[in-house]
Amino acid sequence: MFTLLSADSSTAARRGRLSLAHGEVETPAFMPVGTRGTVKSVHPSELIDPSLDCRIILGNTYHLHLRPGTAVLDTFGGLHEFMRWDRPILTDSGGYQVFSLSKLRKITEEGVRFQSHLDGSPLFLTPESVLETQRSIGSDICMILDECPPFPCERDYAAKSLALTQRWAERARDWITAHRPPGQCYFGIVQGGCYPDLREKAARDLVALDFDGYAIGGLSVGEPVPDMLKAVEIAAPLLPTDKPRYAMGLGQPDQLLELIARGIDMFDCVLPTRVARNGTAYTPEGPIHMKNACWEHDTRPLAPAGETHPLCEGFSRAYLRHLIKNDEILGLRLLTLHNLAFYLHLMKRVRHAIETATFADFKDDFIARYRGGLTKI
Amino acid sequence: MFTLLSADSSTAARRGRLSLAHGEVETPAFMPVGTRGTVKSVHPSELIDPSLDCRIILGNTYHLHLRPGTAVLDTFGGLHEFMRWDRPILTDSGGYQVFSLSKLRKITEEGVRFQSHLDGSPLFLTPESVLETQRSIGSDICMILDECPPFPCERDYAAKSLALTQRWAERARDWITAHRPPGQCYFGIVQGGCYPDLREKAARDLVALDFDGYAIGGLSVGEPVPDMLKAVEIAAPLLPTDKPRYAMGLGQPDQLLELIARGIDMFDCVLPTRVARNGTAYTPEGPIHMKNACWEHDTRPLAPAGETHPLCEGFSRAYLRHLIKNDEILGLRLLTLHNLAFYLHLMKRVRHAIETATFADFKDDFIARYRGGLTKI
């Protein structure tokens, strides 16, 4: 399901193609986050339109399990028909949300017991149950259950956590062998925290289980960026070159380029859509906040034509500020489309740069111009 | 600026056309409400698209005066350029918001003094100042300042209020004669509460001042629907046939048909957009609430193709329920577009019915099928 089309000569960047049940995805690829069966504020036709040409979105199994629930998804034969999206969907396992959203949780060998963040009702996730839920969702790519240790994390806890994650991966492997529904493929997740030897062991043990692709997880949980990059530098070279590599939950635009240079093919991140709803727009110089008074009389567009979404063209920064300041839905719609265009166009330019053997220069130029720091995940 | 194209033989319904600075408007017409320079959640291109073909929108002078303010509007040469809407705009005078939103207000002969509902800052509206603000907005149709008495209202207060409204109308007339900016026209407002003789006097005195059109105001402020219809029945026949007639702030779909039958040409109402944001969708059988559990597994569309907005086609009631229940922006976007399509298509069918001398039957059929009552303004 993955074809490596070309590899950069001066970095580890790769140009590839995923062939999934619902279509092809050119890599490096960015996946907009559609937590509950909708990329927030965006109509599926806007994602498919050539101005974005989004090939794959991410859904959150935990949220979809709570609402609408598998009974409704089964009525529709899966999330694709329910949300009217006929391109690929990747879903996470729900494990990350258990650790980030749920207050009361108990991890056992069998799985993780916790309370719904919506109504406190008891839930129990196992390596098998999350794959069954993703079968109801009908995801093109399913993620297996892992434990995502916090940062900082004692070495002893990290090692025990990784051992459990590996045993869960083996159970997932068994479930897949027994049940693999047609049209679904499965990614394992490399954990190991910020301990290089654990990351290395995690990658080697996971590869032995022969998944369809490999994610690097447990990143952007509070660790310094150099530690995050280091974890990827250790794990990526140990993953098979003929399988896709996915850095979960990342990241800022400049971080994406650093990760692509280290051999990552796929990304998902709430940033472009979430910060849009708070009034932040990405520009080649870095994120800017549209509520700032400096835009009050600014008649210039947010970006030159062709460097934003077509639906944002014509609107002034003053008008965008007015909309955002007044919590007008059109404002967050426009910034969401602009930021998605920024991320998806960036990936398109990256793919072109790899094809034309100019990626290293492209990355250096982008990073030299880009000033991050305004927004945090 | 108004051409009466035809009149119904069995009711007082009229088919007409407004020729305004920014284009023509076929009447009877419904004006979606764009309070702060945006019809909430809707992109201007969606309003212009033939699926809605919205010819005119309403803006609220009070809100626009506070934000973005006339200094910003002057920078852009008016609201049309600021919000990138090149079709007609009607603005109210701000008087109604003073009475409905402002807690501290003092009405004097000169005008009305009150505090901003946003930050409590002092504001002072006069019959002249509201026209100056609407000059900055660049409205195609400006409304003059009136006092909107509450319901119920003692006869003595209603009479004194009407006399003040009439003196303010005379001052507005003087301002218009002295200043009339090109491309703007001006509507007077018939007040008089639920007192038939005051409504009659209001209409006669206002017509003597020769405005470009006439609104009937002070309706839907809590009075019974028969009283509302009665006020229109008294006022409308006293208004010149060659000028447009506008029922401010109304109403439910079935009420619109009753008002059209009484000779009204123009309407504005927050209902289709506001109730959409609460999860209510209009149907030929009446409004339905999409949060209801009955839709949980319902695979049917909200309405047959052609009876909803194209962007809603394909989505099931179950998916719309899921979106609305989870406060997903796509849900209120879709219901807003659906409800606007419902109102604007209804006006289109009304115009066709008047043209083909079938309006009375059309109205009776619609009302017999329609069950209102779920939503209140």
Image: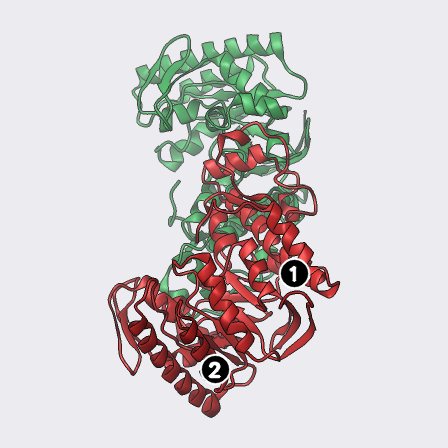
Chain colours: A green, B red
Q: Badge 1: how crowded within 10 Å, few (<14), some, or many (20+)?
A: some
Which is more toward the observer, A143 or A205? A143
| A15 left or right of A172 in image | right
Amino acid type at circle 1 is: Asp
x and y, in percent, of residue B332 in the image: 51, 46
Q: Are discs 1 and 2 less than 8 Å apart at CB?
A: no
Which is more toward the observer, B209 or B21? B209
Q: Chain of mark 1?
A: B
Which is more toward the observer, B276 or A284? B276
Instruction: For mark 2, give the secondary structure.
Output: helix
Which is more toward the observer, B357 or A94? B357
Instruction: For mark 1, give the secondary structure.
Output: loop
Q: Is residue B122 visible?
A: yes
Q: Residue at x 34, y 68 (%)?
A: B149
Q: Residue at x 37, y 31 (%)?
A: A221
Disc 2 designates what residue?
B204
For the C terminus of chain A, give its image quadrant. top left
Q: Residue furthest bottom?
A: B178
| A350 left or right of B103 in image | right
Q: Relative to residue A307, is residue A246 depicted above or below?
A: above
N-terminal of the pair, mark 1 or mark 2, is: 1
